[in-house]
Image: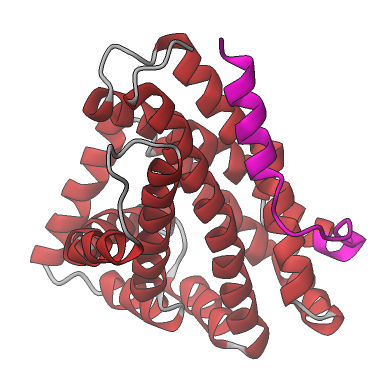
Amino acid sequence: MLRPILSITLLIFMALPGRAAPSAQVQALGDALQLPALMAIMAEEGLAYAGDLEAEMFSGRGGGAWQALVKNIYEAKRLETVMLEVLDEELTTAELETLIAFYTGDLGQRVTDLEVTARRALLDPMVEEGSIAIYEDMALESHPRLALIEDFVQVNDLIERNVAGGLNSNLSFYRGLNEGGAFEYGMSESDMLADVWAQEGDVRDETAQWLYPYLTMAYEPLNDSDLQAYIDMSASEAGIRLNAALFAAFDVMFRQVSYDLGFGAAQFIKGQEL
């Protein structure tokens, strides 16, 4: 019987601290950043990831019930709402004004279009393989564009922030599994932390292996001066604050999603009839 588990997951997800509705400015920034489209893509990524989880952890026992549960967890509008709520808490009115002006301008709109288009394209494994091959060829040739890509990564601290977010998500997944009863004798917090920290190297490698080809593909249509202008924006006070706010928002979102996935997966691992 699926409904009780869906209800539990919904309650868990909505148990985030209550916040006021996002301001009109934050909504405008979210629209300029194309958060609705990005959350829809992330929901598709989540469904694919959940399929891998089922194959690894409870093969043949998930089926339609697992897919329905995962769709509920990754409901795109709910993900967007969490993002906007955190951005509303993190950014000042003055910062929002500066950011909206940039991201509704020509360069800002082109950048977000390219980022979203590239991420959507990478849903296709063949495109992802192609992007990796192109990046590796450019790296072998020491292509000058890669210096700008590296500057962008460094200015936004993308490797460290993504690794930290990935480890936090993995820990939340363990906690969901544990509290859902997946481990026969339970798992201590220290054991979960040890297991997660043991994954740090793999998470770092996977982050770099995905990030550099993605950015190289996404920004390929930009000329060097436009990409440098975007890097300069990212290095500005408002850009730094936006980057920090976005990572804070993703951290809240992915911790909760990961916990819910772990808790839901535990029900199937235990072999309950759903």
From the viewer's perspective, is residue 97 above or below residue 109?
Answer: below
Left or right: residue 237 compared with residue 167: right
Quadrant in which the N terminus is drawn: top right
Q: Residue at x 26, y 29 (%)?
A: 57
Q: Is residue 72 visible?
A: yes
Image coordinates of residue 225 in percent, x first then y, are 48, 77
- Image position of 201 (left or right of 160): left
Q: Nearer the viewer, residue 34 or 246?
A: 246
- Identify the residue at image location x=72%, y=75%: 90
Is 107 drawn above or below residue 12 in the view shown? below
Using the image as rendered, state which of residue 221 and residue 210 is in the foreground.
Answer: 210
Q: Quadrant of residue 141?
A: bottom left
Would you place residue 56 above or below residue 3 in this image? Answer: below
Residue 78 horizontal side relative to residue 134, left or right: right
Queried whether the magenta region covers residue 44, the answer comes back as no
Which residue corresponds to the image point at 36% horizontal and 49% vertical from the top-left? 174
Range of magenta residues:
1-26
Residue 220 visible: no
